[in-house]
Image: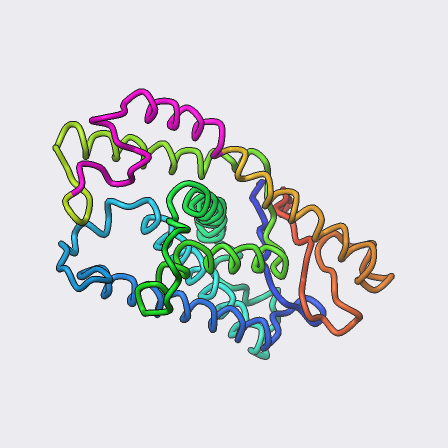
Amino acid sequence: MNFHAVQLCVCVAGNVVTRSYLIYKWFVALFLVANQLLSLTLFSYDSHGHVRKASKYWIYATHWGFVLVTVAFNLDAILVLGRYVIQQSHVSMNKRRPHYESCHRTLKLSMGLTATAYPNALFVTVMFWAFLYDYSQPFVLTWHSYVNLAVHALQTVIVLIDTLVSSRPWRLWHAWCPYICGLTYMFFNVLYILAFDGTGANGEPFVYDILDWKNHPGTCALLVGGCVIGFPLIFGPFYFLAKFRDYCWKKYLSDPADRESSDVATFGGHGVYAISIKLQDTKEPSQ
């Protein structure tokens, strides 16, 4: 019987989750939840104190992406915790495997969410700072400006770091995940504005000024066409970052004995981070 054996992305000492990695995962996961709640709360009024409809929060691609990153990271943290709790048991891991190791759908869901959320975070950051941010305005640190940085920059820093310190495999064919997410948002955006006569949070006839379908449909169509190409390409940095990560750990940082293994790599023999854990096909022994 064939099945996919998916091992968790972990910090290891040997082939186990370390306490430091568990703390890291949950610290960042809770940090993202706190920022998500802050983002939702502050959206009800803008930086000038004007009241806005809370429901309009969901018309922005930025918020779609931030929710995805928060959910993906928290699911991963839950899986890490599950693995950590099981390995603390005196029962052999061969006899008592975590649920997600015998039911690989949970890990596949985690991988799918990550493959969607992480590139989307980078895409949002690039688009915001390249086309939407008003550099003529002086930066003043307030709660609103902090949330603006969190959703347009900080989340991208987090996902890039997590890609480096985790062992999650990245496959080029997974590029369809952010592609579908991006097209779904574009389809929603054009329907919301043209079919339902929707408006932005402050009553603008668009959600983003670069997607003004009523006044500049041609430019919007070109932008959508660019995104069709851009979404798969934005997946590339994560794929190559993961390749570089695996190469460095296997060649320079793992113990000589570990270099023969494709499952685990350790840092200086102390097991700070695990890299190179792969999604692979295995076979159950014949009964």
Asked whether residue 220 is drawn in magenta, I would say yes
Q: Main secondary structure of the magenta part?
A: helix
The residue nearer to you, when weighing 248 against 148, is 148
Q: Is residue 77 left or right of residue 189?
A: right
Q: In this view, does 89 lie to the left or right of 132?
A: right
Q: How is the image coloured?
A: rainbow
- Is residue 105 at all visible to an observer of this figure? no
Q: Which x, y percent locates residue 92?
A: 61, 71
Q: Quadrant of the N terminus?
A: top right
Does residue 196 sit above or below 27 in this rendering?
above
Q: Which residue is drawn at 24% across and 30% down?
A: 190
Q: How many numbered marks, from 0 up?
A: 0
Q: Residue at x 17, y 28 (%)?
A: 194
- Is residue 153 at all visible to an observer of this figure? yes
Asked whether residue 186 is drawn in magenta, I would say no
Q: Which x, y percent locates residue 82?
A: 48, 68
The residue nearer to you, when weighing 74 against 47, is 47
Does residue 84 sit above or below 7 in this rendering?
below
Q: In this view, does 86 lie to the left or right of 53?
A: right
Q: Which x, y percent locates residue 32?
A: 40, 65
Q: Which x, y percent locates residue 129?
A: 45, 47
What segment is highlighted magenta in the picture? 204-231
The residue nearer to you, when weighing 15 against 270, is 270
Residue 39's quadrant in the figure?
bottom left
Q: Which residue is drawn at 32% across and 51% down?
A: 63
Residue 220's quadrant in the figure?
top left
Does residue 159 sit above or below 235 in this rendering?
below
